[in-house]
Image: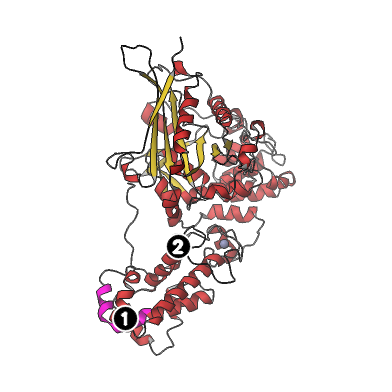
Amino acid sequence: MAFPVEVTSTVGVSKDNLEYGSFRKWLIPISASATIHTDEGKPPVQVGEALAFIIRRSAIQHSFHEMMEPPHQGTMDLALDLFDRYGRLKDEIREHPLRKGSGVWKGELDDGNLVLIEDVKVERRYRRKRVGSKLILHILEQALMSRHNVAFAFAASAAHFNDDGGAGDAKPSSVPHHVKVEGIASFLRFLQFRRVGLTGWFALARDSEHPSRHLVRHKDPNPKLEIDDMIDSDSDEEVVECNADFTQTRVKKSEWDARWLGSKPKQQPAITSRSRPLHYAVKTLPDKDALVFLKSHTRDGILEEFPLESLDGRGDTLLHVAAKASKPACVAWLLRQPTIAAFTVADNYAGYTPLEALQSKLEDRRVRAPHGFSRTRLMADKFDGFDEDSTACLLILRGIKDPSPEQRMRAKFGCSCNECLEGFLSPHMLMKLRVQGQRWDGFLTELIPPGKGWYAEFKDLLNHFPESFRPRVKRSRDLQEAIVLLMGAIVCCLSEGKVPRRAAVLGYLQATEAWARVEGQYFTQGGTVAALVRAVFESAKQLDPELGDGILDAEPGKGQNSGPKCRNDLEFEFVRCHCADDATPEKETDKPLP
Ligand SMILES: [Zn+2]
């Protein structure tokens, strides 16, 4: 006998809520519950539940990744999988010929509030009775109320729609993972969600005129399915082990199993008995050994021969594997093989050429690292360049045989415009810093001669200096004058297209008569060039016209579109750290996550 399913929900939490109370200014949880009432004499029975979050994006856009990481793994995954650090759809999903999938999602995804449908659980014996869709439709109805101003809903096709949970489930489902994922994907498509790029995420546009709403279900592409049987190179994959102090180490899974599950380490089959021996060798052996294996087991070799041109279950050619594993000797050798050279433009199942596959892997590493059991440490601000082997692979795959120091630095620091100064300071960033430097310089010189009023006006600027230095500036006109002069020198440096390091900045002052006072007073009392450079960076970030609420235009007649775009264009903190070379040691900010 069928009983009507009733869905109720709670929208929002109080500030005392332990899980989400501290995020309530921008994160509104919706918990929905599906119940049936079978027996009048007993209370209703819960048969399903769902969790969703309304995200007020504009409130957190300036530090989107940082804000989305702590509340829930789902908010973290959504932010890091689809959006850049400022909450804008990743370029790859808009522009890459294959990774953009259907191509219906573009810049409109950069703005507006979101709802993330995180978790839908239905008791197993009530599945296929539309309980899940009732829960989702109820959540959408709540979230899309006009007061929340939600423009898009998101849901992932994997992992978050858990059908192994629920009190009535004695054992996990035997349905293969990819079948479940396909089932969820078709369910979401039925609700008018469409895949975002080739990712595992689906989105629904509130606007019925959005192109996604006109894309018929069967034309919404799926990524090519990986074939597990053809990926033997992962048989002893690395796992992240979380230590008691929350640091992480990577260990081989077999070692981990042996230590924690007591299983005996399995004898690893010989490389030559793997289904893709060359792939396996390139992935797992050190670069030189892998190269020896490649040479001796291919057509020029003297041993057992394996085909150089084979693909593995991810559609990876050997060149993809060597690139992703950052093995420069293998990459260089492979590119010299006539049958492999054409593979530089071959796409794997994820849609990447070998160079793109490496770039994607490095980009991921640049942005995030696993932390604890389910957290992510955000790394972009501390980026210190890619390792030597990865940099070498990037250069080889780009066809740069004899790189100049500049080209090497650009590859190392992820420059994508090929114009970054010292590899990291892009023309766009340089222009923005110059505009902000000039702005500061204008304010500072307007109030010359310095005096009491000057100090009151520039208290904020002084926040960038050590605490002991600030009261001295209040008392000393010489220090105030030094600050004005140094800011002028920073502007000169930026205007001449130089990285504003201490020596370069001071070069503009050392021949002036004021230099003795600057040197004798400012530096001996704890002043630094880096503190003023930091002020310039900070206002450049806060007032950036590309980041939503910037109030200043880049430069009259020189809009943000002048010059090539670069991956480093909006990485203010990373670039600042690489400019500053006379800062007093900064406080350790690598504290545990909240
Ligand atoms: Zn660049």
Give the CA separation, mark 2 to mark 1.
26 Å
Say which residue appears at 30% left-offset and 79% top-offset.
Answer: 453
Residue drawn at x 49%, y 30% as measured from the top left: 137
- Mark 2 or 1, nearer chain start: 1
Is 470 located above or below residue 359 in the figure? below
Q: Nearer the viewer, mark 2 or mark 1?
A: 2
The stretch drawn in magenta includes residue 478: yes
* Residue 506 placement, left or right of 476: right
Q: Position of residue 346 (x, y in %)?
A: 69, 43
State the image coordinates of residue 379 (x, y, percent, origin top left).
43, 52
Residue tagged 1: 479
How crowded is the residue under tag 2: few (<14 C-alpha within 10 Å), some, or many (20+)? many
Question: Which residue is denoted by mark 2 in the rendering?
Answer: 541
Instruction: Name the residue at the front extreme.
Output: 146
How far across and down, in percent of the image, does residue 311 sit? 66, 36
Q: Is residue 26 left or right of residue 112?
A: left
What's the residue at 43%, 66% (across, down)? Answer: 539
SS under mark 1: helix
The amino acid type of the residue labelled 2 equals Lys
Q: Is residue 93 magenta?
A: no
Question: Which portion, as a residue range, is magenta?
Answer: 469-483
x, y percent for residue 73: 42, 39
The residue type indicated by label 1 comes to: Leu
Place residue 512 in its image quadrant: bottom left
Image height check: is 116 above or below 26? above
Quarter for ligand 1?
A: bottom right
Residue 479 shown left or right of residue 572 in the figure? left
Please name the predominant secondary structure of the magenta segment in the image.
Answer: helix
